[in-house]
């Protein structure tokens, strides 16, 4: 459409120039202009006009090629943008699945830890009951030969009356060490309770 409009403008301009030349040639005897020179000028004008029309045609073709290239580029960019959005959506969906799976795993780990803790407590309760039923002297001898940490775990679960009987039958140095460890555990539990409550 643009090419057609420019072509029409060039035709109109050519008509105006021809009319001007005809009028000019008609009055040339008045101005004393040589007709041959006018004809030569007209030929030169036609040549220049043809050159200009060719250049205008070339410019129009270049503009059309540029417009086509621009449209192709824009279409390609839209396609790439659409692909990127799809990829982003896929990644977001995958990330959401991973987060959901991670949450489930954390919940399972927490449940497993609670189960293990409950099993350990149940075992410790049974062991503690066994020590509570033993003679204090026998219980003291066994606990003295255990790792201090394990022995203290058992001693913590015993009632104060049974605990005092077992400690009384122990080597005084071991009994003092276990008492300090028990006291330390009680203080830490109290500190944790106070901190959690405030």
Image (cartoon, grey):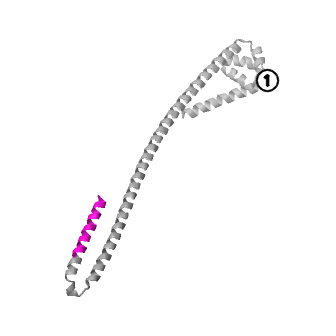
Residue at figure coordinates x 28%, y 79% from the top left = 39
Which of the 4 image quarters holds residue 111?
A: top right
Q: Which residue is at 31% across, 76% downward?
A: 43
Q: Considering the image in quadrants, where does the C terminus appear?
A: top right
| Residue at the extreme front | 36
- Is 172 included in the stretch rendered in magenta? no
Choose between 129 and 113: the one closer to the eye: 113
* Figure quadrant of residue 106: top right
How many numbered badges does the structure rendering display? 1
Say which of 85 and 74 sits in front. 74
Q: Is residue 17 left or right of residue 76?
A: left
Majority secondary structure in the magenta region: helix
Q: Closer to the camera, 103 or 51?
A: 51
Residue at x 41% of width, y 48% of height: 78
Asked if the stretch drawn in magenta spans residue 2, the answer is: yes
Q: Quadrant of residue 158?
A: top right
Query: Is residue 191 shown left or right of residue 49?
Result: right
Q: In the image, which residues are magenta?
A: 1-19
Task: Tell me if 38 is positioned left or right of 174 in this view.
Answer: left
Q: Residue 31: x percent and y percent?
A: 22, 87
State the residue at coordinates (28%, 60%).
4
Residue 76, percent from left and from top = 43, 49
Q: Which residue is mark 1?
A: 172
Where residue 19 appears, as percent x and y from the top left, is 21, 74
Image position, residue 91 (x, y; %) = 49, 39
Compared with 123, 55 (above or below) is: below
Q: Give the SS element for disc 1.
A: helix
In the picture, measured across the screen, residue 92 lies left or right of residue 123, that is left
Please say if 145 is above or below 34: above
Please identify the quadrant where the N terminus is shown: bottom left
């Amino acid at each position: 459409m643009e090419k057609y409009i420019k072509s029409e403008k060039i035709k109109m301009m050519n008509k105006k120039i021809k009319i001007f030349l005809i009028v000019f040639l008609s009055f040339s005897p008045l101005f004393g202009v040589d007709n041959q020179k006018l004809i030569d000028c007209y030929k030169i004008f036609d040549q220049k006009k043809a050159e200009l029309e060719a250049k205008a045609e070339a410019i129009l073709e270049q503009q059309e090629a540029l417009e086509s290239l621009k449209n192709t580029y824009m279409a390609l960019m839209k396609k790439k943008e659409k692909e990127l959005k799809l990829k982003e959506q896929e990644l977001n969906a995958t990330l959401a699945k991973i987060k959901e799976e991670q949450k489930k795993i954390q919940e399972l780990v927490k449940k497993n830890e609670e189960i293990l803790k409950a099993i350990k407590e149940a075992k410790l309760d049974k062991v503690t009951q066994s020590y509570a039923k033993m003679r204090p002297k026998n219980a003291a001898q066994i606990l003295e030969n255990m790792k201090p940490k394990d022995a203290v775990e058992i001693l913590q679960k015993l009632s104060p009356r049974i605990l005092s009987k077992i400690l009384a039958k122990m080597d005084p140095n071991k009994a003092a060490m276990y008492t300090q460890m028990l006291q330390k555990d009680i203080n830490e539990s109290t500190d944790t309770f106070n901190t959690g409550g405030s």
